[in-house]
Amino acid sequence: MPFADRTILSAINHVLRQERWALDRLRPFSGSFMLLVAPPLRLFWRIDELGCFDSADIHASPDVTLTFPSD
């Protein structure tokens, strides 16, 4: 995983760990895959059993895709 991807993943998980309610909301989706598209980034993550995000194999099919405009 590229350094920028690890940094973003680490930062988002840091915020999630500070907000228990967010982890509680994500935990039921454990094992689900998310594709985040924010040009030029394409980040593919899996929700783990704690409700945090973890890197995932880009060849899996995403359960949800979040797309942000490039501007």
Image (cartoon, grey):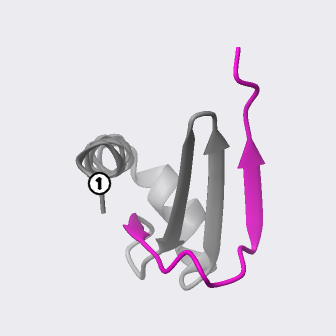
**Three-letter amino acid code of the residue under disc 1:** Pro
Front residue of this view, candidates 62 and 27 = 62
Left-right relation of 51 to 66: left
Rendered residue at 62%/50% (across/down): 36
Residue 21 on image: x %, y %? 49, 52
64 drawn magenta? yes
Rendered residue at 64%/60% (across/down): 35
The residue stretch that appears in magenta:
53-71
Q: Quadrant of residue 29?
A: bottom right
Front residue of this view, candidates 36 and 17 = 36
In this rendering, is residue 13 above or below 62?
above
Rendered residue at 43%/78% (across/down): 48
Residue 23 on image: x %, y %? 46, 60
- Say which quadrant the C terminus sits in: top right
Number of on-image labels: 1
Left-right relation of 7 to 40: left
Left-right relation of 68 to 14: right
Identity of the residue furthest to the top in this view: 71
Q: Residues within 10 Å of mark 1 (few under 14, many from 20)?
A: few
Q: Quadrant of residue 65?
A: bottom right
In this rendering, is residue 30 above or below 52?
below
Per the picture, the main secondary structure of the magenta-coloured stretch is: loop
Front residue of this view, candidates 53 and 23 = 53
In this rendering, is residue 71 above or below 30?
above
Residue 45 on image: x %, y %? 50, 66
Left-right relation of 58 to 23: right
- Say which quadrant the N terminus sits in: bottom left
Judged from the image, the secondary structure of the residue bearing numbered disc 1 is loop
Q: Which residue is mark 1?
A: 2
Residue 26 on image: x %, y %? 56, 65
